[in-house]
Amino acid sequence: MTGEFDAHERRMWTGAAKAYAGSFAALCAATAGPLLDAAGVRDGARVLDVGTGPGTIAVAALARGAGVVAVDAEPSMVELAAANAPGADVRHGVLPELPFPDGSFDAVVANFVVNHVEDPWAVLTELRRVARPGGRLAVTVWHATANEAMSLFNQALDEAGVVRPSYPAPMSFARTAEGLRGLLDQAGLDEVAGSELAWTHREDPEVWWSGPAGGVAGIGRVLSEQTPEMYARVKAAYDKLAAERLDGDGLIGLPAVAVLASGRC
């Protein structure tokens, strides 16, 4: 079943694969190693990468010698992931239902996916279903308050005087290590563990801007709905703020904090 928030997410990501791959994907790739470690992905393991996007996690799992199946709800992401991860079986799949029998995989991973679904508990329950008994599940989400990677865009919107529209909201959970562990507990996993992952993403300001400029994610949706005049005001505010953060190498530092949780199925 697809609710109002899930439908909103589908619209938001339509056709966004290339813009995402050229902007925010590098930020999200930073958690690939810890995520696969937490899921116990190793040579010979059968892995499901849910919400694969451009295939970043699928590529990393293939490099470990795993057999990889990857799914995404957005057709442009499926096409791009298949090109980037030719050794993986990449398919279209829409949560909260997956087209696989019970116990199909040794490990199931979802990198920044649970924060993009209407019912996180239902999704985690489905991910547990397709993992074999004794297999592992690992997921990441952005931290609710400590993550500042997107703050530059929000500051620019505020300085330009953009009034945020009201969008559908998902079911709420605490986006902390404790909150995500609690969701995995509720979904029936054992030996649940959680932690925070912190790093600074360094990027060219124009590359970073290309994400929302290309309509990527919620910030891109907001920007796409502005008049040309307001768009220009936001860009001018962004350029000013980015210039204040520039280091000697011409890059900006973007502090990021993610939450990782994993358990045994």
Image (cartoon, helix red, strand yellow):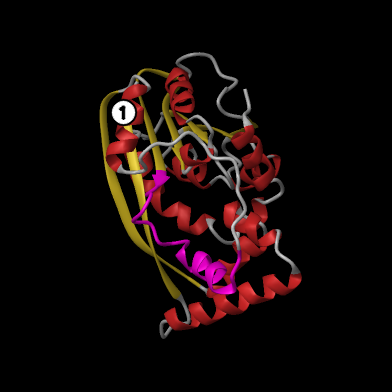
Task: Quadrant for residue 9, please give it.
Answer: top right
Estimate the x, y position of residue 85 in percent, counting from the top left.
58, 43
**Residue type pointed to by label 1:** Gly
Q: Nearer the viewer, residue 57 or 85?
A: 57
Q: Nearer the viewer, residue 20 or 182?
A: 182
The furthest residue to the right: 228
Residue 77 visible somewhere in the drawing: yes
The residue under label 1 is 263
Q: Does the magenta segment cover residue 161?
A: yes
Task: Quadrant for residue 76, please give it.
Answer: top right
Magenta region: 141-162
Q: Locate residue 91 relative to residue 60 in the image: left or right.
A: right
Q: Locate residue 129 relative to residue 175 in the image: left or right.
A: right
Residue at (46, 31) in percent of width and height: 120
Q: Does the magenta segment cover residue 181?
A: no
Q: Secondary structure at mark 1?
A: strand
Residue 72 visible somewhere in the drawing: no
Estimate the x, y position of residue 25 in percent, counting from the top left.
53, 55
Estimate the x, y position of residue 157 in percent, counting from the top left.
56, 67
The furthest residue to the bottom: 248
> Pointer 1: residues within 10 angstroms few (<14), some, or many (20+)?
many
Where 35 falls versus 240 (above or below)?
above
Count up the numbered dots: 1
Q: Where the N terminus falls, by quadrant? A: top right
Q: Nearer the viewer, residue 58 or 247?
A: 247
Where 199 falls versus 10 (above or below)?
below
Estimate the x, y position of residue 36 in percent, counting from the top left.
38, 40
Q: Where the C terminus falls, by quadrant? A: top left
